[in-house]
Amino acid sequence: MTSHLERAFEACWSAMLQGETLETCLSRYSDLSHTLRPMLQAAQGAHAHWDSAVPGSAITRSRTRVLSRAAELRRRLAPRRRPSPLPRMAFVGAALFLLFIFGGAGLVAASAETLPGDDLYPIKLAVEQVQLRTALSTSTRLSLASSFEMRRIEEIKRLLLLHRVAPVQFDGRLDQISGDLYTVEGVPVMASPATQLASDLRPGDFVSVAGDTHSAGWVLAASILRAGQQFVGVVDAMGAENWTVSGSSVRLAPDSQIDSGIALGDRVTVQLHSEDGRMVAASIHLLERGSSGPAPVTPGEIPPAAVTSAVPSSTHMPSSEDGAGTPTKAPAPETISFAGMVQSKSQAEWTIDGHTVSVTAQTQIEGSIQTGDTVDVSAERMADGSLRAQKISLVQSNWDGGGDSGESYEFTGRVESISSAQWVIAGRVVLIDSHTDIEGSPEVGDRVQVKVFTKADGSLQAEKIENQDSGSGGEGSSTPSHDD
Amino acid sequence: MLYSPGYAALGHPTVAAFFAPDGLMNDEPIDLGRLARMDPDAIAQAHDRFFAELYRYVRYRVPSEDVAEDIVSDVFIRLLDAIRRGKSPHTNLRGWLLSTSSNAVNDFFRRAYQRDSSGLDETLASDDPGPTSILDNQARQADLQAALAQLTPEQQHVIALRFGAGYSLQETAELMGKGINAIKALQFRAIGALRRHMGTDLP
């Protein structure tokens, strides 16, 4: 009986979705109508609240968050490229030699259970670095990095249980915020007025926490920043070890990549990452010369002070009512510049940091820019409010080209330019040589399938290009042609 | 489905692409190999492909657009984490995403109840002023969501898939990894339970 009811319910519900009325359907199951009616009415009620609308802004924001997380993961896994196996093996040999000579295997083993603040703890971290650097594949490195992250968090939880005070740094998901108490991966983190806090943190964000464990059972945070955080600001002060950018202290490291010629008052993009428990500058790139600076700008906003044209935003735009019908010359469109992540690319439009900019034949594009890369944009704001890109330049590539050097993979896309030495296909620069097998005489605009391998310097060498010319555009897709 | 034997041999994501037979399931393939390498194009492609479906599913069950957006975004980040930990879905990415969405919604309600059970009711009800019909609609939706939250996780999942996200019986069966007859029985029980929890409020 129940099975009969279930079938009748499904049959009626399917028919009602096709437009049949409840009564018509029930008439076919008169013996069950007493039971079926309330069930179908309940289904109608449950279905009545289906809302098919999806806010476009939600997609953009979400994509930004997800790509930021992916960029952070790639940064942690930044491949130590190996032109040949020899340097890697040499590194392994040297590392192991040093560890055993100066420490011995027992020392390495003893370090495994240490916690931050212990004398042997640096050895534990060094061993992990050896493991990461000698991982034979991206996937192995991913797995190792993840397990080390989890290990950091477990160490901190043990420190808290033991009421020990030690400097700590870890990355993780922000679980919740309650006043000054932040919970990150289950670890209570207390913010103080001295804590450097990222703006607008929300549960679910991935953050880097640096600070000290406190005997009261929480971590007193020196900083809680979005993992791999980038911000734009003006250089307020420049020291040998620290700069101040829009009021925020930025610690430099020996390997910080800093554009030459940056002066006080210049507007820069700062990319931070964690190192030895502190947030340090991975890179500082010059965005714009200037003598006076704008207020700090949070990612995702077009900085107001980035307006560089002589036409302020409040300038009255002439209309047909102005000047008693006298023809008026439209003012020059204002020029704005901003930096951000490329969230999507098509032939005519790119979305960068949540802003859609049109790309024309006049747009100057510097560098081989991929989705997920960080770029500088100079654009004109048109009368209708839209942005037309004048120049887009690569600031930082967040994409390593698909994996370790030597890896071969395929992708499809349209040919954007052809020269004797290199082609641009779906936004990727592909090197051509006499060994490249080119089939079907592809021309600019044709859709092709490309098999490439990643060279030691990160460039892509084409092995085969085959004209598909299916007539459908797009960014293309790719598949690995062999194992990682 | 396209299998990459090499990945399988290494114990890595084994399915290079996901195909399904019809309707909502008929998509271009998503390349897990590229996702595993955190290829931004592949990630953006997967995100944009599934966001709307997941959003509708989640929005059906939670009280606000902001919450739905956060949860869906979090589901994609969980996917990235799962991939790098070698625990990515091998056969049914959509099913994995929807199942994870369901768990994330359950987590949301669990946290909300832990914070303050009375606060949840406030969350579910809207304070926005507006025409009476809109308020009535919001109130009914809040009632529905509150009643849904009383069901078992599996019953909530099937109701949201079938009556919230609009999947067919066949699709729901595939997404939940069950037979069609099992889904018929499950949804019948779920509708019955929903009706009991809604009392006489359902039409």
Image: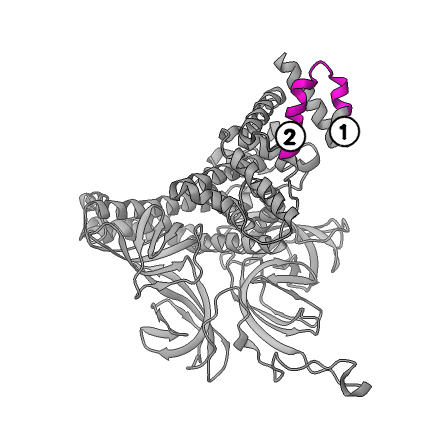
- Residue B45 in the image: x percent, y percent? 61, 49
The residue nearer to you, when weighing A264 against A44, is A44
Residue depicted at x 35% and y 48%:
A149
Q: Which residue is mark 1?
A: A21
Mark 2 element type = helix
**B22 within the magenta span:** no
The residue nearer to you, when weighing A457 against A386, is A386
Few, some or many residues within 10 Å of mark 2 (<14, 14–19, 20+): many
Q: In the displayed structure, would residue A20 be above or below residue A279?
A: above
Q: Which residues are drawn in magenta?
A: A24-46
Chain letter for mark 1, please. A
**Where, quadrant-wise, is the N terminus of chain A in this rendering?**
top right
Chain letter for mark 2, please. A
Using the image, tell me which numbered label, if any, was put on residue A450: none
Residue depicted at x 62% and y 80%:
A314
Q: Which residue is mark 2?
A: A43
Q: Is residue B138 left or right of residue A68?
A: right
- Residue B84 in the image: x percent, y percent? 45, 44
The residue nearer to you, when weighing B173 against A272, is B173
Please tell me which of labels 2 and 1 falls first in the chain: 1
Q: Is residue A82 visible?
A: no
What is the three-letter code of the residue carrying label 1? Thr
**A31 within the magenta span:** yes
Mark 1 element type = loop
What is the three-letter code of the residue carrying label 2? Ala
